[in-house]
Every structure is written in structure tokens, then in C-alpha cells.
Amino acid sequence: MSKLGVILSKEFRQIIRNPAIIRLIFIMPVIQLLVLPNAADYEIKNINLQVTDHDHSALSRRLIDNISATGYFKVIGYGSDRNQAMVAIEKDKADLILEIPHNFERDLIREESARLMLAVNAINGVKASLGGAYLNNLLRQFNGDIRTEWLQPDRLQKPFSITTTFTNWFNPGMNYKYFMVPGILVLLLTMVGMNLTAINIVREKEIGTIEQINVSPIKKHHFILGKLIPFWVLGLVVLTIGFLIARLVYGIVPLGAYWTIYVFAAVYLLVILGMGLLVSTFSATQQQAMLVSFFIMMIFILMGGLYTSIDSMPEWAKWITRINPVTYFIEVMRRVVLKGANLGDVTKELSIILGYALLVNGLAILSYRKRS
Amino acid sequence: MNGITINNISKSYPLKKGKQEALKNIELTIPEGELFGLIGPDGAGKTTLFRILTTLLLPDSGTASVNGLDTTKDFMQIRKEVGYMPGRFSLYTDLTVEENLNFFANIFNTSVKENYHLIKEVYKMIEPFKKVRAGKLSGGMKQKLALSCALIHKPKTLFLDEPTTGVDAVSRKEFWELLRSLRAEGITIMVSTPYMDEASLCDRVGLIQQGSMMGVDTPQHLRNAFGKKLLSVKGPDMLQLLRQLQAMDTVEHAYPFGEYHHAVLKDAAFLPELPANIEVKEVEPDIEDCFISLMRTHAG
């Protein structure tokens, strides 16, 4: 048996005997893929709306009916007291206040204009801005509706109105799970890969076995490869489990080929595992390694383009996303799954990740020293 | 030239302020096939010396050679030819006894079968447990497994860093018997221990304290070189007695020694007068006595 074979068989034996690793590999993808896509929903529902109606007219009631019929808003209070509405916001019960002034209907009929007030609780920024925008949209629609209605008798003069209809390319139902699930799969691979490798060499340091390895004639690259290959295989196993869940639970079948994703994932894993190894050669204890890899992962994940759009980041942040391997994989994953991209379409990303893999692993081999 | 040669080796570790000198100008030659004991308390620099000789650490200055190979230049070759058993148990606790042994044999391009004769004596004591994970073994058995693993590639030189620390008296005795039988195979053995009573089992010993080698000789020569009268004293109130002894003009120094106190007399001095209920007898110096006296002369 070759030296590498000896090291590999030892590593695999140790992994199989470690119940924590086995649990992590099989349970983490299942839990994350079942829970996260259902919870991390970009559509804002259940926006709590407090209505202060000073008008009590047919028109104001119709407006409120219109709003609650959309399903996005939950009218949690209806009254004519402004203070009561403010209390609801202060207690965080309401996200929005819609205030309908006195003589809303009368003004609209007589003077052909009326004013409404919209107050937004900006504690939860996403909910507030999206809720405000939804409601604004609804009001505009309502405005258009009543205008056409009232102008109806005058059949000679048709009102101008522009209506927009739209189609969602690549994801016709605009099912956010179609782009969340592939993204979460990337995060999963990143977390499992980096954490496991980061604590692995450190574990040998902590229990002292690295001393025995260091005085042996094992070559550095044999040792590093022996650490890398098992987790590379495990990473691909996790990916497979993830795809199985995506298919069985969410019915997601990539439009492109599976093997395109596997080829990319194979190279991507080298980057992530290499970073884990790099962290572990610089750490003295498992705790240190965990914290450092956690810190790196946190930045990678939050700046990976899954939870926030990269296009709306400031320029300096965009530069960070460009050195973030997670960004590239999420991008490629979505393109393959939703758009059906093939290997030829992602050569740019693939070559960047490949260069990254060589750099990181080269550094890992260089920085692992058998003597001090 | 085979064996171990150490020329003027120094090593210090950086501290927040200044540095900690771990080894100061160590000179030592160990001929091939010798069982050499490095005796010294914790923190004397024993492990640092081992780590330099096993190519894990570079010395600040000086040179060393093992089996005629330079520890800085020919380190790859040295790693093939030496066996090292670190002070801490450092085998894979999640692998079985057999798997550990096979792993260490295989990474040295050999097999357990090929060198079985070398480890037979040690290994047969743990063979009944070969399917047991190494982490579940007792302290003494762990040491035997570690020795087997360090021996399995037939090293020319064996480095054992405190192999008997934390091991019971019976296992310690067995362990030393094993070492003496290995010496018969022609393997050079360098072993460190904080236990002075193990010194007499070595061919030669080096007494090391605070990074300096205070003396290197056979145990017998060291004892002969003591050169002073040594008294063993015992009485009903031992603490009081020690103070009394230390205060006497004729006594150079006195220290507790097991259930007795040892008192070293000044040159040509005679027995001090002591009450009748106190037991006094002249004894032969032990390695520990030699060590303590060398420590005093070195401290100035």
C-alpha cells in the first residue's frame, strides 16, 4: 500500500468511528434544507396594519377591504383614535398605520383630491420598507380603480392608464425556494467542509499524535492530501444528500446537468477545505480553529449574495464579494439549476475557483511545518 | 561515527519579556549501543533536547548528530532511522492497538511481520487486547504500545521521553527490563526520567538542571565522586530534627530523603552529637544525593 493509501485508510477509519462527524454529515443537510427554505422567505406576509379611520365612509371601508383582501396585511386594529394607533406601534404590535382623514370621501368627490397618511415602524427595516411599498402600490391601484369608475358615465372620453404585466424568466412561478434551496446547499457544503477540516489537524496537535507523524518520514503533501481527500469525498456526499432532499421535498430538478454542478463543487470544495487546513495549521487548539473558521464563514455567507443582493452593496463590499468563493458557487449553482447553464457557460467562474484552490492549498502545504 | 553527538547546543524560547533559556551549551557524546539516562527535574530541558535530536526543533546554536547524520541537514534520513516516544501518550486513541501498530509500521514502509522479533517481548503483553481501542488501555499498557510503535521500524536509535512517568512500580520495572533487552539488540537508547532511582539501571547518566548538564558518568562513578561522608538520620520529630541538622557547623547541608533525612558532612568533620533517641547511620550516596550536591555547587 502506498503511503497516501495508509494515511487515507487511517483517516477514513477515524471519521467512521467519530459519531459527531457522521451525525453532522447526515443530519445537518436534512435539518437545514427542511427548515431554512421554509423560514427564510423573502415575501413579506402578515404585515400588521393599524387603521385610524376618521372618515367612516363607504369609500374608506372599501379601501380597507381592498387592503385586507390581498392577504399580505393583517388589520390588527381599527379605530378613530390616533393615540391608540401610536400605542400599537410603540408596543410593536403594528408595522404600519394608515390614517384616513375626515371628509376623505367628500374631498375626493368635490375637490378630486384627498390625502392619506402612512406611518411605518422602521424597527424591522425589511418588513417596514416592503410593507410600505406594497401598501403604496395598493393605494395607487385603488386610486386608478375609482377614477375609472367615476369617469365611466362619460363614454366619449376614455381615461388614460398604463398597466404593466410581467413574466418571471427562469423561475415562472417566482418560487423563491427555487433560488433559496440551491443557495442553502452551497452554504451547507461550505460549513461542513471548512469546520471539519479546520478542527482536524488541530485535533492531532491537541492529542499529540502530530509529534509522531512529524518524526516519521511522511511527506508534507502526503499528510495534507490525506487530510483533504476524505473530507472532499464527504463534501460530495453532503451535496448528493442535499440534491436528493431538494428533489424529493421541493421538486427541484436542475435545468442543467448535475455533473456540471459536481465538477464545480469538486473544485470549490478544494478551496473550502484548503482554507480549513490553513486555519488549522495556524491554530493551537480546536476551540481557536472553530472560532476563526466561524468568523471567516460568517463573512463569506453574509456576503455571498444569498441573503442580500450584491448589486445593492457599496463598491468596497462588492470587492469583498469578488474574493468570496461562496459568491461564485451560489451564482453558478443558480445558473445551472434555474437557467440550465452548462460547463462552457461557467468557465470564468470555474477558472477563478481553480486558481483560488491552487493558491489556498499551496499556502496550506507551505505553512504546515514539521519542525520549528 | 554512530551514536549521538551533541556539540555546544543552546536553545531558548522567547518570553513576553526576554527569553527562557532551555538549554545552555550542552556537550554530550553517547556511543552506539548505550543505554543513556537523562536525569533531571521537570523543566530542566530534557524534552527540548529530545525534540532537537528528533529533528522537531532547530537549535539556536551548536550542532548535533544522530547515527552520524546532522540533525539540521540530514533530517529526512534521521526520521527514517530513529524511534521517538514523546512524554505524552500520542497514539490514535480511536484506533485499536493493532491498527496503531500497523499504521506506524506502514508509514515507515515496513510491516509488523518483518520486525516482529524486535517488539515480541513488549507486544506479547498487550497482544490479548489488540482489538481494543488504544484510548481504553491502562497507563502501563499505553506505554508498552507506544514503545512497540516506536520500535516497529527497527530504529538504530530510540528516544524515550519520560516513558515511566505516571506508570505504576511494577510496570516501571518491566519497562526497564525491556529497555535492557533492547540494548542487547544493539539499539542506542536515550531515555529521560525524573526518577533518580531509575538512574542506576542506565549504562551512563547525564544530570541536567536548568538547561545545563551538571555531570555525565556511569552511576557508579558518580556515586564514587561524591567524596563526602553522608549520614542518614531519623528521629521522633522530623521537622525539628531537620532544622537542627541544618544549623550545625559540621553539616554542609541536610535535606529530607524518604523517611530519613540525609546530612552531608563537611570535609574531615565527625559525627555530630545527637540525643540518644535519634537514629544515625553512615550511608552510601545515591544518585539523588549526587544530584542534590551537584545542584548546590552549580548554584554557586
Image (tube, rainbow, N blue to C red):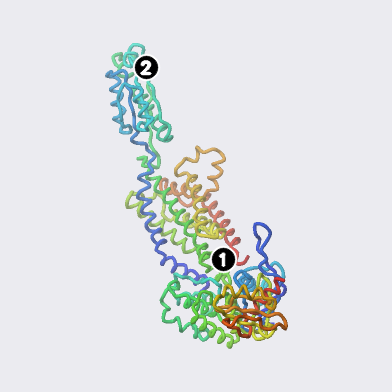
User: How far across and how far down the image is residue A302, in percent?
Assistant: 48, 45
Residue A135 vs A12, above or below: the answer is above
Pointer 2 residue:
A114
Give the residue furthest to the front: B275
The subunit letter for the residue under badge 1 reads A
Residue sitting at x 54%, y 46%: A322
Q: Find residue B166 and name its label.
A: none
Most foreground residue, A368 or B216: B216
**Could you tell which of marks 2 and 1 lies nearer the N-terminus?**
2
Residue type (three-letter) at the residue carrying disc 2? Ala
Position of the C terminus of chain B, as image quadrant, is: bottom right
Give the residue furthest to the left: A58
The subunit letter for the residue under badge 2 reads A
Q: Find residue A221 and name its label.
A: 1
Residue type (three-letter) at the residue carrying disc 1? His
User: How far across and how far down the image is residue A185, in percent?
Assistant: 42, 51
Mark 1: give few (<14), some (14-19) or many (20+) Cα within 10 Å.
some
